Image: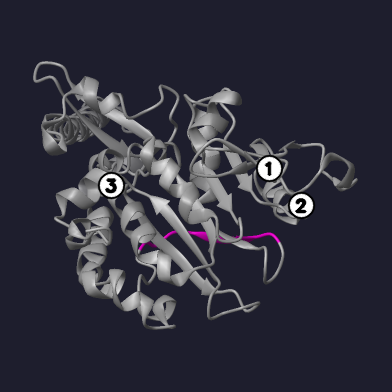
Amino acid sequence: MQRARVLREPGDEATLPVVERERKLLFAESRAAVIVAAALVVLIAGFVVVLRVSRPCAYGADARSTSSLLNAQDTRVDVLRNESRGTAVVVDKQGNSCELSLRMSDGFYCMSDEEWTVRTNIVRDQAPKQCSKKECCTFQRQHRSWYMLHFEPEWSCIKSRIGARGDGGKWMCDLHIIEERAKNRNSPCLIYSIGSNNDFRFEEAIHERLPDCEIFTFDPTVMSHNLSSSLPPFVQFRHWGLKGDDTFERGMQFYRLDTIMDKLGHTDREIDIFKIDIEGHEYKAFEGVFKRGYEKKIRSIQIELHKQRENGQLFLDLRRAGFLVYSKEPNFVAPAELHEVAFMRISSKYLEDMNDPLLEYNCSQ
């Protein structure tokens, strides 16, 4: 109370030095408290960074092997390195490690290790229910409900319907990732549309969604003089068909996938979207793909299947290559025989590491 009285009486000059000293002391104490608090914040932040950097990579990856999965301009992730240990931790923009997903998806996905583990557990739990060897390879020839009973969608992604309603339209998976990866590597995404029947609604729709992608459409049944005048200018059309061997039949040219990619200069690229509808010839065509190891050149497949009695081996071969089903629906033009199925390639190592039981099945044995 006495101090309050002194401050209210400016004429009392004797008290001013004391008040001034106390004010300066109070200011110094406040400034010291601020400095201490700031130092604590810096110390805690540094401790968090040290913990992140010192945490070893999944699978013991060193900095070079980790960064090899990434494009130098990949904006999805940061790489925290510990040069003394030769280790690196890849984290997404929220600071969560995405090492598992990058390594197990050949660099396609970057999601938290926690989310990746949840997805992996779903795939692992569903695998025994997808198909037994007897059902895949023997039962399929006796039952007309093969599509209904086997290989339910097991991979979750952001799906987009592209193309016509009903027949001709396809479900796409994680187009935003395809788009972002193309920008990061400064190279356009690549789309192969096998079989068109002179209908380019799919190409028009996918171009609207991914305008920077290169689109190649193939169909040997469409002759030059019959090619629709509505062929979009952004579509590069080839009068070629896809088969298991390079052959010329009934006036039409057919090639294996590796031959097509070589002729187009695409052997060092990945096909982001592989849409295929070739009226039952898909089975022989994929035999050629697997024979040459070109399944690793494809990221996603959207296919119309025509012969359910031949599906077992195709599904098992795709699974061995690391493809998982993300969409399945009947084509109501002929639902007993026709089905639209879509696959996303994770990696063969992904399924091998979880000891997927379906990898042991082979209908030819």
Asked whether the residues under the numbered discs 1 and 2 touch, taking CB atoms below 8 Å apart as contact, a structural biologist would say yes
Residue type at numbered disc 1 = Thr
Query: In percent of the image, x 43 and y 62: which residue is there?
Result: 326
Location of residue 115 in the rendering, given as x and y in whole percent from the top left corner: 28, 56
Location of residue 53 in the rendering, given as x and y in whole percent from the top left corner: 17, 29
Query: In percent of the image, x 14 and y 30: which residue is there?
Result: 50
Which of discs 3 and 1 lies nearer the camera? The answer is: 1
Q: Which residue is mark 2?
A: 200
Location of residue 157 in the rendering, given as x and y in whole percent from the top left corner: 44, 59
Return the disc, 3 or 2, that comes first in the chain's sequence: 3
Q: Which residues are magenta?
A: 155-163
Disc 3 crowd, CA 10 A, few/some/many (<14, 14-19, 20+): few
Q: Nearer the viewer, residue 25 or 278?
A: 278
Q: CA distance from mark 3 to mark 1?
A: 89 Å
In the rendered view, does 237 fall on the left or right side of 153?
right
Q: CA distance from mark 1 to mark 2?
A: 9 Å
Q: Nearer the viewer, residue 36 or 72?
A: 72
Q: Which residue is mark 3?
A: 4
